[in-house]
Amino acid sequence: MEKSKVYFADLRVRDGDNLLRKLQRLIRAAGIEKINFRDQYAAVKIHFGEPGNLAFLRPNYAGAVADVIKELGGKPFLTDCNTLYVGGRKNALDHLDSAYKNGFVPYATGCHILIADGLKGTDEALVPVEGGTYVTEARIGRAVMDADVFISLSHFKGHENTGFGGALKNIGMGCGSRAGKMEMHSAGKPHVNQANCIGCGKCTKICAHGASVVSEGKASIDHNKCVGCGRCIGVCPKDAVEPASDESNDILNCKIAEYAKAVCHGRPHFHISLVIDVSPYCDCHAENDAAIVPNVGMFASFDPVALDVACADAVNAQPPVRNSMLGDALEENGEDHDHFHAVSPDTNWKSAIEHAVKIGLGNEEYELITVR
């Protein structure tokens, strides 16, 4: 197989230039103009950052990408899906509030936000996974699938479950509805935390299989009837319905790859990753620890798999920051040639890459092309 092309730009700029223009030169050099954007809706998948976290990508980068899409005749919108866990992005209203607080307003980005899986995280499209091993139909936020063109704009950083979070995780996990996220995280079915349940009965009304019942003021779920769709999680006003988190990290990574293929398959797609502020954990945390390596630069490719490998290689080539989680881990445990494994020893990011290659999403072999 021919190597995939991954384009790279460092973070150096001269007087009269700036990083936003350099990012635009990068994505043009990488071939984004080959996509027909004329009168096409273009979903730009980004993470808006959990309130309290400061490592997420600044909205200016999203604005730079949106401006190129508009120059090419497209209709861009920023998007993400609601979170499975309790936090500032679990429903569309809270999600929008969080995005606006973190600066993702149309005046800064030049385009609007659509939360792809709707108000409660239940607006989803069932998308077949061609060649899938673990997932037959991915549950993807409907607005993502309604778009004509898909663009991912990812903050490349570490992750406590998957090793790192890059393009595949931004696409696969990020575009899953709340039920889709449950499917990736779990082989089991949801249960009710009785202490939080108020017996409102919303879960019983949404369940098509009669699995959820309220008795003596508390709901419970009959797992013999439950099909694991997760819609009860979305409608519960008190977050009393909780998913099982019993899937191994390797299978989680494989499911993420399969969800990513469902999102990208059959339409134009293009991917951008910024390796800056490489925090050890996900931007879903309401905080961020110190970066584990120095800032590296910006990457772009039509191949999300090759893009992730190139970014991982670039991070692993960097010296560790001493006063960071990586620096502490290396001092305690000795040298580890994989920075992500050193920070999160129970993870194996290569499982996602290997499975993505197996199902035909992309190629792990790449040619790195530098853009000035």
Image: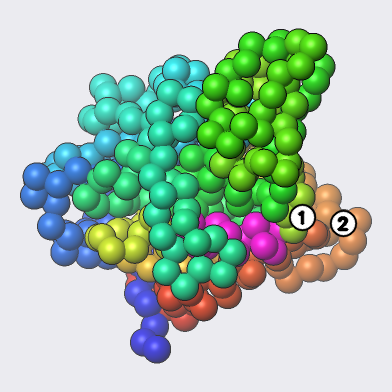
Q: Residue at image x 82%, y 68%? A: 335
Q: Which residues are magenta?
A: 249-260
Q: Nearer the viewer, residue 191 or 221?
A: 221
> Which residue corresponds to mark 2?
331
Q: Residue at image x 60%, y 49%? A: 183
Check disc 1 and give the amino acid type. Ser
Which of discs 2 and 1 lies nearer the camera? The answer is: 1
The picture quadrant where one finds residue 243 is top right
Check disc 2 and give the amino acid type. Glu
Crowd class of label 2 (few under 14; some 14 to 19; many from 20; radius 10 Å): few
> Which residue corresponds to mark 1?
344
Q: Is residue 318 visible?
A: no
Q: Residue at image x 63%, y 70%? A: 350
| Up/down of 18 relative to 349, above or below | above
Quadrant of the snapshot with the N terminus: bottom left
Instruction: Determine the secondary structure under disc 2.
Output: helix
Residue 254 location in percent, x, y?
60, 64
